[in-house]
Image: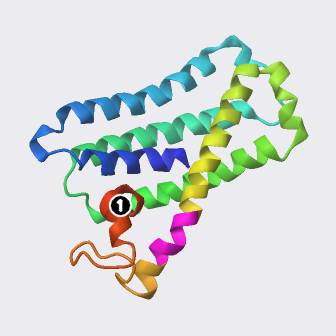
Amino acid sequence: MWLYMYPHFCYVLVRYFPFHNRRAIRYLLIAGALAMILPQIIILADPKSERSCPKGLLNMLFALIVLSVAMTCFTITFLIMEPIPTLIKFTFHAFGGVAALYQFVLMSKSFGDDRFSNCHTTVPTLWYYFFFLAVVGTLCLVFYIVMAPFWLWNSLYRKDSLYNNTTRQGVFWPVVQCCGCLWHI
């Protein structure tokens, strides 16, 4: 889920800066997105990564590179465009579903199967990288699972009862006033 969380984080963070003074933070966040692809390319180029593993880690790495490129494209789009068209928002949320599915597969391979743990002897770099991503992605997934009922309640059941930005009312207005990045989706 970190693939979904990073562009969302960038979207919220860049709007804390004045409109005409966002160039440096945009460049920094785009460099951060590109830096997330770099270890994947290094691991892919490593000759040890060609060794076999019964869980298909190399296939997972290829899928991760494709999803990371999509994440970088969404990050650049969210940093450059204002306002964001509805179709791009919808596509981003669909990408979030694909990222969640990828995270569930990664979690099931990392935490649920003993054959995956045997891969640390054959492809150690790839195994440690995926284990790190499984832990980080699980933390992001827990955040979204905790926040999702509130977002759904506010948007579907009782419109703007928990948080309404235009009237500055709602149960969560004092909390969101301090940290708006928690609420925005």
Is 87 rendered above or below residue 168?
above
What quarter of the picture does the C terminus occupy? bottom left
Which residue in the structure is indicated by mark 1?
Answer: 89
Tell me where residue 75 sits by quadrant.
Answer: top left
* Residue 52 seen in this snapshot: no
Is 144 rendered above or below residue 166?
above
The answer to whether residue 69 is left or right of residue 99 is left
Q: Is residue 13 shown in magenta? A: no
Is 61 rendered above or below residue 164?
above
Q: Position of residue 36 (x, y in %)?
A: 48, 30
Q: Position of residue 180 (x, y in %)?
A: 33, 59
Tell me the magenta residue range.
146-152
Residue drawn at x 21%, y 30% as measured from the top left:
24
Categorize mark 1 by other alpha carbons within 10 Å: few (<14), some (14-19), many (20+).
Answer: some
* Three-letter residue code for mark 1: Lys
> From this viewpoint, which residue is outermost toward the left?
20
The answer to whether residue 59 is left or right of residue 14 is right
> From this viewpoint, which residue is outermost toward the top?
47
Tell me where residue 170 sits by quadrant.
Answer: bottom left
The answer to whether residue 42 is left or right of residue 48 is left
Tell me where residue 163 sits by quadrant.
Answer: bottom left
Q: Nearer the viewer, residue 3 or 144?
A: 144
Residue drawn at x 35%, y 56% as measured from the top left:
179
Disc 1, SS: helix
Q: Could you tell me what secondary structure mostly forms the magenta stretch?
A: helix
The answer to whether residue 30 is left or right of residue 1 is left
Please give the count of numbered marks on the rendered protein: 1
Q: Nearer the viewer, residue 48 or 172?
A: 172
